[in-house]
Image: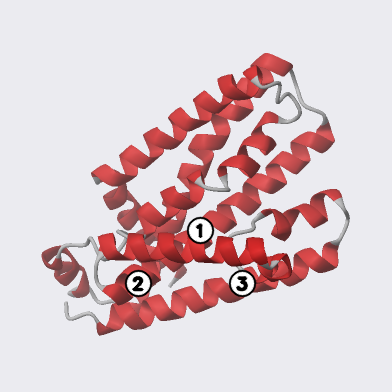
């Protein structure tokens, strides 16, 4: 079962790479990472450039890239292609999870394409970072990948329910903006939303507050489960 899932996810990931949108998003994320190196150096952001880049870009840039990818992950699939896949001896649930894992891997590649230039640029410009800074940067990279994957799962679910990648993208952006506004007006509600990544990881990295981080990671897990279940229900209802 695991081998079949890995094979299906790999095939779906290759299909995404053959498509135009993922190539554009990967190139865009790489260019943003390179530009951030020069901008960060001009602004004097010498203290762990990759970590600073992740924190700043997760505010707007990475969420938009994840929503753009997730909103078209399954809705953009042509009916002929999906019908061919459904002829295989696998369930719809298995096919859905394979596509979702492929999308999650694509999201991780987008994050890495943005992280690697900042890491290499910081190394060239400022030398080898301290072990503690390197560890914090890698921890935030892992958190950013989990967070970006969550946004992709939620955007995919929204698009499946509305039945359109364009409408799904618009609805996801509106929901993001609404949560940002509510979180700004009521800061105590931030940890319940997916818009404040910093509150989910930084207490553990810099304040030693493992309890707060664990509680927010539980919210993240709950959002993953909810997004996956709702997406699966919408996928099963589609008349392929």
Residue annotated with mark 3: 221
| Residue 97 position by quadrant | bottom left
- Image depth: mark 3 or mark 2 in front: 3
Name the residue: 68% across, 36% down.
52
Q: Is residue 184 above or below residue 227?
A: above
Element type at mark 1: helix
- Cα–Cα gap, marks 3 and 2: 19 Å
Q: Residue at x 19, y 68 (%)?
A: 82
Q: Nearer the viewer, residue 129 or 189?
A: 189
Which residue does the numbered mark 1 point to in the structure image? 149
Q: Residue furthest right?
A: 208
Q: Which residue is mark 2?
A: 96
- Is tag 3's residue or tag 2's residue first in the polypeptide sequence? 2
Mark 2, secondary structure of its residue: helix
How far apart are the two marked residues, 1 and 2, measured between alpha carbons? 15 Å
Distance of label 1 from label 3 (alpha carbons): 11 Å
Q: Is residue 13 left or right of residue 55?
A: left
The mark tally for this picture is: 3
């Amino acid at each position: 079962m695991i081998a079949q899932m890995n094979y299906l996810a790999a095939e779906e990931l290759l299909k995404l790479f053959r498509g135009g949108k993922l190539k554009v998003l990967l190139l865009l994320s790489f260019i943003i990472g390179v530009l951030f190196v020069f901008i960060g150096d001009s602004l004097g952001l010498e203290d762990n450039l990759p970590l600073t880049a992740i924190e700043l870009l997760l505010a707007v840039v990475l969420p938009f890239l994840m929503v753009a990818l997730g909103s078209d992950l399954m809705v953009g699939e042509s009916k002929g292609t999906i019908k061919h896949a459904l002829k295989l001896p696998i369930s719809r649930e298995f096919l859905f999870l394979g596509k979702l894992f492929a999308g999650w891997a694509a999201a991780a590649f987008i994050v890495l394409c943005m992280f690697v230039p900042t890491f290499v640029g910081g190394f060239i410009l400022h030398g080898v970072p301290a072990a503690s800074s390197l560890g914090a940067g890698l921890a935030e990279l892992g958190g950013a990948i989990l967070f970006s994957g969550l946004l992709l799962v939620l955007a995919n679910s929204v698009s499946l329910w509305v039945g359109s990648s364009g409408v799904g993208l618009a609805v996801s952006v509106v929901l993001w903006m609404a949560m940002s506004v509510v979180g700004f007006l009521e800061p105590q509600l931030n940890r319940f939303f997916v818009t404040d990544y910093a509150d989910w990881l930084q207490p553990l990295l810099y304040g030693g507050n493992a309890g707060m981080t664990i509680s927010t990671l539980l919210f993240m897990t709950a959002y993953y489960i909810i997004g996956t279940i709702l997406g699966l229900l919408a996928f099963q209802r589609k008349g392929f």
